[in-house]
Amino acid sequence: MPSIETLTSAPLVQIASALRRRRLSPVELVDAYTRRIEASAGLHAFITPPGEQARREAQRAERRLARGESGALLGIPIAVKDLFATRALRTTAGSRILKDWVPSSDATVVARLRAAGAIVFGKTNLHEFAYGVSTANPWWGIARNPHDSRRSPGGSSGGSAIAVVAGLSAGALGSDTGGSIRVPASLCGCVGLKPTFGAIPLNGTFPLGWSLDHAGPLARTVDDAGVLLDVLTGVDAGRKSRRVPTRGLRVGVLQGSIVENVQPAVSRQVDAAAAGLRRHGLRVREVAIPEMQWTVATQLVTLRAEASALHARWIRAQPRAYGADVRTRLQLGSLVAGADYVLAQRMRARIRAAMSRVFHDIDVLLLPSTPIAAPVVGERTVRWRSGEEPVDGALVRLTAPFNLTGLPALSVPFGATAGLPIGVQVVGQWNDEARVLAVGRLLEGVSR
């Protein structure tokens, strides 16, 4: 039997099997994760680390397992991004404004995790109010990439990705408005899934952009993400993550201006992923979606307007309660004209229609998750032959289009460069998470 320390870094499905067979105790597991969290404090993965409440939940889970009770996540510690309300457990949204807020009820997704038997295992660090992609939080600590502490883990769900990759929990819950699950999954080297818009309810989740926000899992494997997806969507077991045949599936490898500026190592891994899928009997060809060149501006106008509307009262009354970068974004958003927002939504409809047309000819789209590997903390620009690009803009350039359109998108670790992980992104048709996960499993096998 593997040691407890080994199991803390094992896939969730393996941990669940060990718990069901009584080869592992939930209390032993929680204690092992707690030791690892204490030893990894410098990564700043947590705002509120798991405490005695988590250990009491583990003891209850142990009694339930002894009685032969079942639950998809019974006894499994799941870290929760500190954007989701947790009953009797502080929820800050990564801010100073909400530093003392203790909700009286759970967000729907947290309630579903508990109903499946999961142990809510602390609240993870995030970019303040989820409005950024570095998790350089001015109030709760600058999060660090577990592969190289000089580098960013990405964000805004940076703490959740760290928890998964560093073996601090069995899985984690994140949110994604422009890439906030997939970006840290790519930079840290885990699986991150943004499902179809609306597939997972957001009741009790502090919003950022109402029409762009998604919730989803971060996990060590695609199978783990599928298990979490079934719980979070509340569907009958296996429906969202069911295994589907892949031979003969049509894969479109994205081409065009939006993927011109990509690090060579990242491009090579996408090519290798496409070649691997072809060897497994999938039909691979290049596709272009010219309308995607409009997604950066459309996403920017949409998010800035929606976030600033949400924060209008606080940003006027207490602007210095925000960190400098988030304060600037909110103040700039207040300058977005109503006409610009309307025009952005018209353009958004055109982008959505273009993607719908593409999916008449392909089953999944393949592209990088991020055009770069993890940048150094504080790095502001990326240099390309064509000029410079802000790091924040580069990180979400290839993820944000699928928040605008609401398509399901999965980031899978695929290779590395200079010891830093690279993520490959698989995008599917609306409500076709099963096929996206199936292709993700193939990529996982090819990358080994």
Image (cartoon, grey):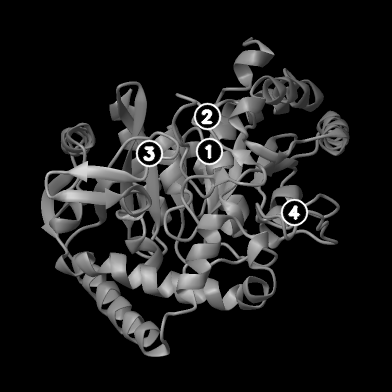
Which is nearer the eye, 127 or 232?
127
Which is nearer the eye, 381 or 435?
381
The residue that disc 1 covers is 161
Q: Is residue 374 left or right of residue 279?
A: right
Label 2 to label 4, Cα distance in Å? 23 Å
The residue that disc 2 covers is 165
Amino acid identity at mark 2: Val
* Mark 2 in CB contact with mark 1 (< 8 angstroms): yes
* Mark 3 in CB contact with mark 1 (< 8 angstroms): no
Determine whether the residue tagged by mark 1 lies in a helix, strand or loop. helix
Label 1 to label 4, Cα distance in Å? 18 Å
Amino acid identity at mark 3: Val
The residue that disc 3 covers is 412
> Where the N terminus falls, by quadrant?
top right
Determine whether the residue tagged by mark 3 lies in a helix, strand or loop. strand
Residue at the extreme bottom of the image, as rendered? 339
Label 3 to label 2, Cα distance in Å? 13 Å
Which is nearer the eye, 446 or 153?
153
Q: Indicate which disc, 4 or 3, sits on the residue closer to the N terminus.
A: 4
Q: Position of residue 360 (x, y in %)?
A: 20, 67
Q: Indicate which disc, 3 or 1, sits on the residue closer to the N terminus.
A: 1
Q: Is residue 179 left or right of residue 70?
A: left
| Viewer-nearest of discs 1 and 4 | 4
The residue that disc 4 covers is 91
Q: Position of residue 29 (x, y in %)?
A: 73, 23
Q: Indicate which disc, 3 or 2, sits on the residue closer to the N terminus.
A: 2
Q: Indicate which disc, 1 or 4, sits on the residue closer to the N terminus.
A: 4
Label 4 to label 3, Cα distance in Å? 29 Å
What residue appears at the point 53 percent right and 52 percent down from the top-left corner? 216
Corner quadrant of residue 93: bottom right
Residue neighbourhood size for the residue with mark 1, other residues' Cα within 10 Å, grouped as few (<14), some (14–19), many (≥20):
many
